[in-house]
Amino acid sequence: MLKNKVILYMFLTIIGGAIFVGSQAWEWATFIRGDYGAVETRGGRILQFVNADTGERAALSDFAASIPEERVQHERKNGLWFSKGGSLPTYTVEEVVEGLRANPNILIRTEQMTEKGEKVLLTRTETLEKIKDANMVVEGANLIRNEYGSRLFADFFFFITGFHGFHVFSGVVINVIIFFNVILGTYERRGHYEMVEKVGLYWHFVDLVWVFVFTFFYLV
Amino acid sequence: MAHEHKLEIFRGLIKFKSNTTKIWGVLVFLTIVTAVEVALGIIRPEFLTDNHLIGMKLLNWIFIMLTLVKAYYIAWDFMHLRDEKSSLKRAVVWTPIFLVSYLIFILLFEADYIYNVWKDGFVKWNF
């Protein structure tokens, strides 16, 4: 039996799994932190900002005004019943509205799609009208809010990729256990490597799931 | 293992010398399919995104079909279903096909209902 080859391929599989989980962690961290920032309306719709000259998305830091004021994070110890407020975003709604009024080249892009599947871009007049609905500043994405677009998509994205990532993580852990068993010669003494096959079956089940996750969250 | 392996893929078009080379061959094939998917996703050719079939873009139909192709080879070769008895294969394949069809039916009906409530309902949501 080719013990050394099994060791090599188990090792490569573990490295591959670690690269996958690492990439996913980086992606999550990037999405949670956010890139540009947006505002949400009272109806829960997201409004993004676009630079009219370039057509690129504009970050809040590009145009938001700075209004000096006292902003206090609501903490557990100050609460009526030990509930704490959400963390404060970098800018207040007033600062974003003020900055938007002062910069004539910033337009609002809504969550709604045109027939071509692109987000609807408002005119300057519509923009100034729409910003009155702004309720809160959103930076990054999580299970509830999403600066990139529909809230439901972020919810599904984190739910599904999180579930799959957890399966990959447990697969890596199981692979590590088997890897050490191979090194220790457990399966040589047993006379067969069927455990590697069984764990491989689990690993490829997770692989099968990823094929679908990849299609529906990254390609479509 | 002492059991016999079926070493032909593409209905006998390619026959591998051993089960190990078959795994590598399938890996190469799946890598090519994935590369095609990613390339299509980056280019997004206009005749595929502008034309629809049963309410879905042609591009998405291609993605889903290529995904099913990949799923087939993962299950058949990486998970060794090809070497199993046909009764086991059928039990494994038809159960999820039934459940997923049921799920798709529920999701599409529910989503369509919610879409119509938003579109024609008296409750304003886009504010």
Image (spheres, coloured by chain):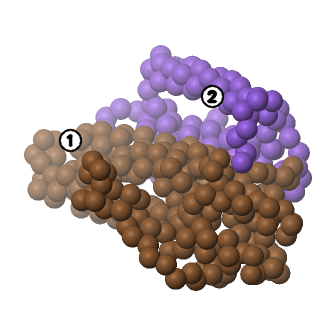
Chain colours: A brown, B purple
Residue type indicated by callout 2: Leu
Give the numbered dot on residue A192.
Answer: 1
x and y, in percent, of residue A63 in the image: 67, 81
Instruction: From the viewer's side, name the closer residue of B119 and A17.
Output: B119
At 49% across and 37% down in the image, what residue appears? B75
The answer to whether residue B63 shows anywhere in this view is: yes
Above or below, A100 against B65 in this view is below
Which residue does the image show at 84% across and 62% down from the upper left? A126
* B48 lies above or below B74: below
From what the image shows, is residue A50 above or below residue B90? Answer: below
Is A173 in front, or is B124? B124
Residue B119 position by quadrant: top right
Secondary structure beneath dot 2 equals helix
Nearest the camera: A149 or B60?
A149
Q: Which mark is residue B107?
A: 2
A72 with respect to A2 (left or right):
right
Residue B41 is marked as none
Kind of residue sitting beneath label 1:
His
Chain letter, disc 1 residue = A
Displayed quadrant of residue A97? bottom right
Q: How crowded is mark 2: few (under 14 residues within 10 Å), some or many (20 or more)?
A: few
Where residue B19 sits in the image (x, y, percent)? Answer: 44, 45
Q: Foreground residue, B100 or A72?
A: A72
Residue B32 position in % (x across, y down): 63, 57
Q: Can residue B22 be seen in this view?
A: no
Mark 1, residues whose alpha carbon is within 10 Å: few (<14), some, or many (≥20)? few
> What distance separates the C-alpha of mark 1 from that of mark 2?
45 Å
